[in-house]
Image: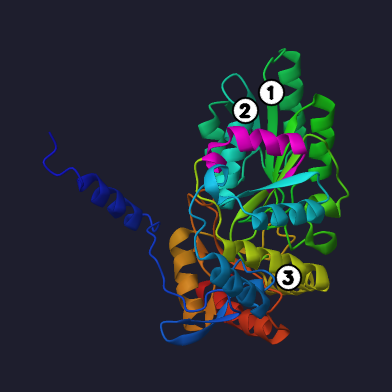
Amino acid sequence: MNAQPLQFMQQHLNTLHDRHLYRQLRTVAAGAEPWVEVDGRSILNLSSNNYLGFSTRPELKAAAAVAAEVAGCGSGSSRLIAGNSERHLVLERRLADFKHSESALLFNSGYSANVGIISSLVGAGDLILSDQLNHASIIDGCRLSRAQCKIFPHCDVAALEELLASTAQLGHQGKVLVVTDTVFSMDGDLAPLAEIVCLCKHYNALLVIDEAHATGCLGPGGRGLAAQLGIEYEAMISVGTFSKALGSFGAFMAGPNLVREYLINVSRNFIFTTALPAPVIAASLAALDILQQEPQSVEHLQQLAAFFRQSLQQLGFNTLTSQTHIVPILITDSALALQMASELLVQGVFAVAIRPPTVPAGSARIRTSLMATHSRDDLLYALDAFERVGRRLGVI
């Protein structure tokens, strides 16, 4: 019997250190603002998912404060017991209107939503076809579903079609589910969604799309990539979050009424968790109000991102296939990525190094994310720092 049952942990941490993959928590004051305090210094923040700057808006703060005063800070129960309130139903109706869908259902986080939805829709004997670069929550949902999962190369429509065709030819009797992010969180590129929907329609496959990084950032009124492309499909289920562009917390499913009722009765991630509290619901409603009143913020965000991305490319940085407000800078080596992030911080820019297993081996990078509340001067400041550090380290 092992006399030191915790020793394996230290051994694993030592290995992570050796591979430059060790992670530590960093304390950041007001981490959702364009400028944050890190180690007592004011630093330009290029690492927040608060894409529209909503999380610090007075309207969200006031709405949350009023709701806390009226209903308290916790819901006290799951929604199927005593935690369901009129606020939850109002938000779901607003979300259905926002996404132009029949209905919506709240979840407590994007991670919980993906795991709960995927593991509810398919099981043993079914098949999932998943993009190679899908988020970890999608991967875990696939694993927990007990369905067979086949991975198709990133955004490779031809490979997906080949998998669907061979599945049909083999006479597969179970359900087939295709799942993809719409905006990929580490590359900032877009799924070929129109083509994927056409394939799903042809082969009668269910489709789950994760619009976490598209909601509030793309499409008319910030409704996402599916809305931007004008896509409708009766067997498509959309997942969105409040914790990014909408500045609050929680997540939601938007889709047919039948899917909502099914998940209420089947999804363990919905059934066995405490309902989102009133202050969170109130802040989320306020965020939808602001987005409706200020739809121009969506286009402004993408204009800033295009300027920053193109400027980095002109300096000689490799921004991979980014098309959005998420702009990665490929470094490849994890140790070098850590060094670059450290030197950028010295120069007054907070842009974190992303390393395996978050990204594939050999593709370590600096991940930057833009906010609509960044100014052009902020981005020029960042570009100057990137150029100086990049040249010193031989990245450009």
Residue 25: % across, % down: 39, 66
Relative to the observer, which residue lies in front, 38 or 62? Answer: 62
Name the kind of residue labelled 2 in the image.
Answer: Val
Alpha carbons under labels 3 and 2: distance apart: 37 Å
Disc 1 crowd, CA 10 A, few/some/many (<14, 14-19, 20+): some
- Whichever of labels 1 and 2 marks the residue nearer the N terminus, that label is 2
Q: Is mark 1 on a helix, strand or loop?
A: loop
Image depth: mark 3 or mark 2 in front: 2
**Which label's residue is closer to the chain start, 3 or 1?**
1
Could you say which quadrant of the image residue 256 lies in?
top right
Q: CB under 8 Å between callouts 1 and 2?
A: yes
Instruction: Name the kind of residue labelled 3 in the image.
Output: Ala
Magenta part mainly helix, strand or loop? helix
The answer, for residue 17, to whether it is visible in the render is: yes
| Picture residue at 75% right of the left edge, 14% below the top | 169
Q: What stretch is highlighted in magenta?
A: 253-271
Q: In the picture provided, is 372 more to the left or to the right than 369? A: right
**What amino acid is found at the position of numbered circle 1 in the picture?**
Lys
Residue designated by label 3: 305
Q: Is mark 2 on a helix, strand or loop?
A: loop
Q: Are marks 3 and 2 in contact (CB under 8 Å)?
A: no
Q: In which quarter of the image is the N terminus?
A: top left
The alpha-carbon separation of the residues under discs 3 and 1 comes to 39 Å
Q: Name the residue under label 1.
A: 175
N-terminal of the pair, mark 3 or mark 2, is 2
Q: In this view, does 111 lie to the left or right of 210?
A: left
Q: Position of residue 150 (x, y in %)?
A: 61, 29
Query: Of residues 183 and 63, which is closer to you in this image?
Result: 63
Q: Which residue is drawn at 74% across and 63% down?
A: 217
